[in-house]
Amino acid sequence: MSRVNVSEEVSEEVKEVAPVSIPGSMEEDDSLHASESSSVTKKTRILWECKATADQLAKGHVVQLGNPTAVFDTENAERAIVTEIFLKSAYSDCPEPITLGLNLFNKNATEDNSVNNEHGWLHSPTQTDFGTRVVGGSSGFSNLTGLMPYENTRTSLSIYKPDNAINSRYLKQYGNLSRETLMENVVPFKQDGYYLVDQNHVVLNVIQANWDSLGIDVAAEPRFNSRYVQIPCNVFDKVVDDLETQVLSKLPFSDMHQLACKFSTKRAKEFGNNTAVDDTFHAVVEMQIHYTFPPSDSKPSV
C-alpha cells in the first residue's frame, strides 16, 4: 500500500495524550444481570472433594477438575463470566474451619479486577511468623465461603454474585477484544508518526468520543482509499493502552477449563486435639455454577 500524503507533518516529539474516557462506562446502570435475557446462561453442578493432610490444608490444597471438557462442553469456555454460585451441600471431618476459594478470574493477569461480590468476599485470619493477618484470597483464588468444624449439612446458599462486574454495553462493545485484535486492520507508518486505521475500528469510536481532548474529529478526517483514517501514533497507542487498563484487564473472564477450588486452614501446628501434620481429613462441597458469555454477535469491527 502506498503512503497517504500527509497534509500536516506529524511531530517527531511524542506529545503526552490526556487520559480518555471509554464509551459505555461501568457506572451506567446497564448491568450484567439485566443483560442475561439476551445471553445464554448455563448452569452446572460440581462436586469438589478434598482429601488432604493438616499440613497440605495449611498450605492450601488445590483441587482441579479431572475432565473439564466434559463439564464445560462449549467452545467459549475460556471466556465465560460467572454470574452466580450456590453452595448446595457441604461436609467436613476436619476439627478446624476450612476456607473455600475459587480461581474465578483466571483470565486476568492481575487479581485486582474491581469485581465486588454482592454477598461480600470472605476474609479469613491467617497466622504468619509476623502475626495474624486477614486475607480475602491469595495466588489468584478468591475466598467465597467457609466450612465449620465437622460440618455435615448446608442449606442451598448463594455465595457469589457480582454486583458491578460489567455492564451489557461493555460486553457487547469490548467482550471479544484483546490487545492483539486491537491491532488488526491497522497499517503502521511509525517512522512517519502515524497509523492508517480502518474507519470501522473500535479505537476510532473512542477517539471520536474524546475528540475535544484529543483534538481529532474522526468524522471530519479524510479517508485514504475510502477506508483508512490517519491517526498519530501517540494518540492511537494511548487509546489502546487505556482500553486495556480500563476495560480489557477488568473483564471478569474465567477459563472454566482451568477452574479449581482451594481448601485451606490455619497452620497445622495450631490444630487442636493433638492433630499430627500428616493426619488426613476429608471435605466435600457441591456447588452450582451459573455462567454466561459475551453475546455471539457482539464482536465490533476492528
Image: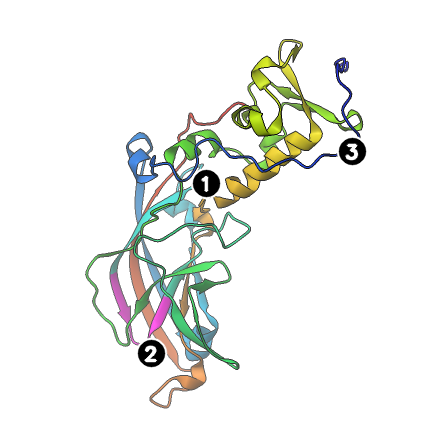
Q: Compared to 103, does 13 lie above or below? A: above
Observer able to see residue 188: no
Residue 190, horizontal then vertical, whole percent: 76, 28
**Residue 259 position within the rendered picture, expressed as x and y whole percent measured from the top left:** 43, 53
Amino acid at circle 1? Arg
The residue beneath circle 2 is 96
Label 1 crowd (10 A; few <14 / some 14-19 / many >=20):
some
Which residue matches tag 3?
Answer: 13
User: Residue most toward the top?
Assistant: 226
Q: Is residue 15 above or below residue 162?
A: above
Amino acid type of the residue that numbered disc 2 sits on in the rendered structure: Glu
Q: Earlier in the sequence, mark 1 or mark 3?
A: 3
Segment colored magenta:
89-99
**3D distance between C-alphas at marks 1 and 3:** 39 Å
Residue shown at 74% from the left, 34% from the top: 14
Which of the numbered marks, if any, corresponds to residue 261? none
How many marks the image carries: the answer is 3
Name the one closer to the observer, 167 or 177. Answer: 167
Residue farthest along the front direction in this orientation: 212
Q: Name the residue under label 1.
A: 79
Q: What residue type is labelled 3?
A: Glu
Label 2 SS:
loop
Magenta stretch: includes residue 49: no
Query: What's the CA distance linking mark 1 and mark 2?
Result: 36 Å
